[in-house]
Image: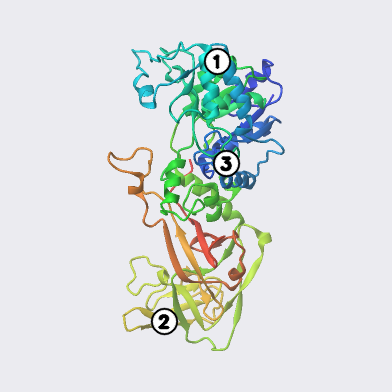
């Protein structure tokens, strides 16, 4: 028996011990009307991960029963994202629409048994007659003769009626305290082209009817879903009990993922894309898996994040800092170090020969001895970052300042001398002298506290960077102030582009998606769409503390 690490596995162990199941079979059923986001990733990891842990299998099934916004583009993207995370479904790939005919047949059987009827309440009347906790729902068509319902349902399929004219409803309990059981709709009329079925169908099953049937037909043992379906579980079980299906899946609900400063509603994410608020579904600020991938997040860091938050039954809010910590922790161990100057300012080493080039060894990754070193050229004219110089320094400023000294990382100590300015008052160049005698050694007559990074102006290449940050300023995007919309809290600093940065020569050959630590700045990834651009994955340090 597998040792349970969460309540889902405890339930599974009970079912195995009681002989209700012998082999665990789960499914991941995304709706192909958008790209997977990190909230889906939690469900994905639970579905595929649970099956793997128990030596079972997991199906991938596209929930394409609602064709309004479904597209093969999303199907392909979902497959790519799942494979990127390291999961596979082998030959167990299905579409919910594969079962349309069988689902229709089961609906007909429900009518014949008196368990379903055709209702012609309008959507407005349906809501009006729904009742409340002290009054049952009402349907004047509940006792419609079986033969009449069969005839109407067949004609609904044949396309004789307009949308909204009729629905097929389950006959359960109009007085139920669970409103999902008050004769819920099983089918509705929709005249819309399906991305796979074309115009073959104009009646489509509701999710609550189609999903348990699909699970049962595929032999799913445990239907793992998010907590909002807990109140739907009695209907799930009713469908299984009243339809002639070959197996009896068990539905188990878990808390969905909520992350601070993040929107995980597919509808809202679609709005951001369609209104050009972001640059597509793979915008590096988006919580989509393709967006996180383009930004530079790794599968390992995302899986580590999902593993750390665990599986719970209660909804909670996870600090986005934990996700950032996970990728920061991984890249700290794996990413090669490189030098980049985001705001270059020229430094002239007056006492260094004009035509001399010297190479200094710099570590590729101090956490990985096998990563070795690389040689960085040193010349008379250098670049340093403007933030590493202050003409009027604040207290305890241990970088370059007038008459002050600083260590150039891995090379000489320099002392600031003349400051040459442009006509507009900006600094054109800083003249310094290097302590050529001490070299890379430590002086015995003084202490130099600061160390800054640098590049040779002659050998540096030019590139661009985009400093990505959190898309929203409000921590809890699920609880906004009254009268406010989530677009009111867009972070204006979520994507700051910096053109003309200076980089090490070797970075010019970086491959799209390749990740580096820009020393003293943060972790960056070569963008996969914009040429010669590096995306900031995450800064070097965050305010989040791991308990």
Task: Say which residue appears at 38% left-offset and 57% top-offset.
Answer: 493
Residue 9 visible from this viewpoint: no
Label placed on residue 371: none
Left or right: 21 in relation to 515: right
Nearer-N-terminus badge (1/2):
1
- Residue ID for mark 1: 111
Residues under numbered marks 1 and 3 in contact, where contact means CB atoms less than 8 Å apart: no
Residues under numbered marks 1 and 2 in contact, where contact means CB atoms less than 8 Å apart: no
> Under tag 1, what secondary structure?
helix
| Residue 211, above or below 110 | below
- Closest to the camera, between mark 2 and mark 3, is 3
Task: Say which residue appears at 61% left-offset and 77% top-offset.
Answer: 359
> Under tag 3, what secondary structure?
loop
* Coordinates of residue 117 in the picture (x, y in percent): 49, 16
Q: Foreground residue, 137 or 21?
A: 137
Q: Quadrant of residue 344?
A: bottom left
- Residue ID for mark 3: 195
| Residue 526, above or below 37 | below
Nearer-N-terminus badge (1/3):
1
Label 2 Cα neighbours within 10 Å, binned few <14 / some 14-19 / many ≥20: some
Q: Quick one: quadrant of the N terminus?
A: top right
> Under tag 2, what secondary structure?
strand
Label 3 Cα neighbours within 10 Å, binned few <14 / some 14-19 / many ≥20: some
- Residue ID for mark 2: 429
How far apart, in angstroms, are the residues tagged by discs 1 and 2?
85 Å
| Residue 169, above or below 466 | above
* Coordinates of residue 294 in the picture (x, y in percent): 55, 55
Tell me how many marks there are: 3
Q: Quadrant of residue 54?
A: top right
Residue 499 visible from this viewpoint: yes
Nearer-N-terminus badge (2/3):
3
How far apart, in angstroms, are the residues tagged by discs 2 and 3?
61 Å
């Amino acid at each position: 028996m597998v040792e349970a690490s969460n309540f889902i596995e405890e339930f599974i162990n009970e079912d195995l011990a009681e002989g209700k199941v012998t082999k665990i079979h789960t499914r991941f059923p995304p709706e192909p009307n958008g790209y997977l986001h990190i909230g889906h990733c939690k469900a994905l990891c639970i579905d595929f991960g649970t099956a793997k842990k128990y030596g079972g299998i997991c199906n991938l099934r596209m929930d394409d029963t609602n064709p309004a916004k479904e597209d093969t583009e999303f199907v392909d993207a979902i497959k790519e994202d799942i494979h990127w995370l390291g999961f596979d479904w082998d030959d167990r790939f299905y579409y919910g629409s594969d079962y349309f005919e069988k689902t229709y047949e089961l609906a007909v059987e429900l009518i014949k048994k008196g368990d379903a009827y055709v209702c012609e309440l309008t959507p407005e009347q349906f809501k009006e007659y729904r009742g409340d906790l002290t009054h049952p729902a009402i349907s004047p068509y509940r006792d419609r003769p079986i033969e009449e319902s069969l005839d109407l349902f067949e004609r609904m399929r044949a396309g004789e009626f307009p949308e909204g004219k009729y629905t097929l409803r389950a006959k359960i309990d109009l007085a139920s305290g669970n409103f999902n059981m008050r004769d819920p709709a099983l089918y509705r009329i929709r005249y819309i082209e399906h991305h796979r079925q074309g115009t073959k169908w104009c009646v489509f099953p509701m999710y609550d009817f189609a999903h348990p049937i699909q699970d049962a037909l595929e032999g799913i043992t445990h239907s793992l879903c998010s907590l909002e379906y807990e109140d739907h579980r009695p209907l799930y079980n009713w469908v299984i009990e009243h339809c002639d299906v070959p197996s009896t899946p068990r539905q188990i609900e878990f808390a969905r993922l909520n992350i601070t400063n993040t929107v995980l509603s597919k509808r809202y994410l679609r709005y951001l894309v369609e209104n050009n608020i972001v640059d597509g579904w793979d915008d590096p600020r988006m919580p989509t898996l393709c967006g996180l991938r383009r930004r530079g997040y790794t599968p390992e860091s995302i899986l580590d994040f999902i593993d750390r938050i665990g599986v719970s039954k209660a909804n909670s809010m996870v600090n986005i800092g934990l996700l950032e910590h996970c990728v920061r922790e991984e890249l700290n161990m794996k990413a090669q170090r490189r030098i980049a100057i985001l705001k270059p300012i020229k430094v002239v080493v007056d006492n260094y020969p004009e035509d001399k080039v010297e190479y200094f060894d710099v570590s590729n990754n101090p956490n990985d001895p096998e990563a070795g070193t690389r040689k960085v050229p040193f010349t008379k004219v250098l670049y340093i970052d403007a933030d590493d110089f202050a003409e009027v320094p604040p207290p305890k400023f241990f970088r370059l300042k007038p008459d002050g000294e600083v260590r150039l990382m891995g090379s000489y100590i320099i002392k600031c001398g003349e400051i040459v300015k442009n006509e507009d008052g900006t600094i054109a160049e800083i003249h310094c002298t290097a302590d050529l005698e001490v070299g890379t050694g430590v002086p015995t007559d003084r202490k130099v506290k600061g160390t800054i990074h640098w590049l040779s102006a002659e050998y540096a290449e030019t590139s661009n960077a985009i400093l990505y940050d959190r898309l929203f300023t409000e921590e809890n995007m699920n609880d906004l102030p009254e009268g406010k919309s989530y677009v009111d809290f867009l972070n204006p600093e979520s994507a700051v582009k910096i053109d003309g940065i200076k980089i090490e020569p070797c970075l010019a050959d970086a491959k799209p998606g390749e990740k580096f630590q820009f020393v003293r700045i943060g972790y960056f990834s070569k963008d996969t769409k914009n040429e010669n651009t590096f995306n900031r994955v995450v800064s070097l340090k965050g305010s989040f503390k791991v308990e």
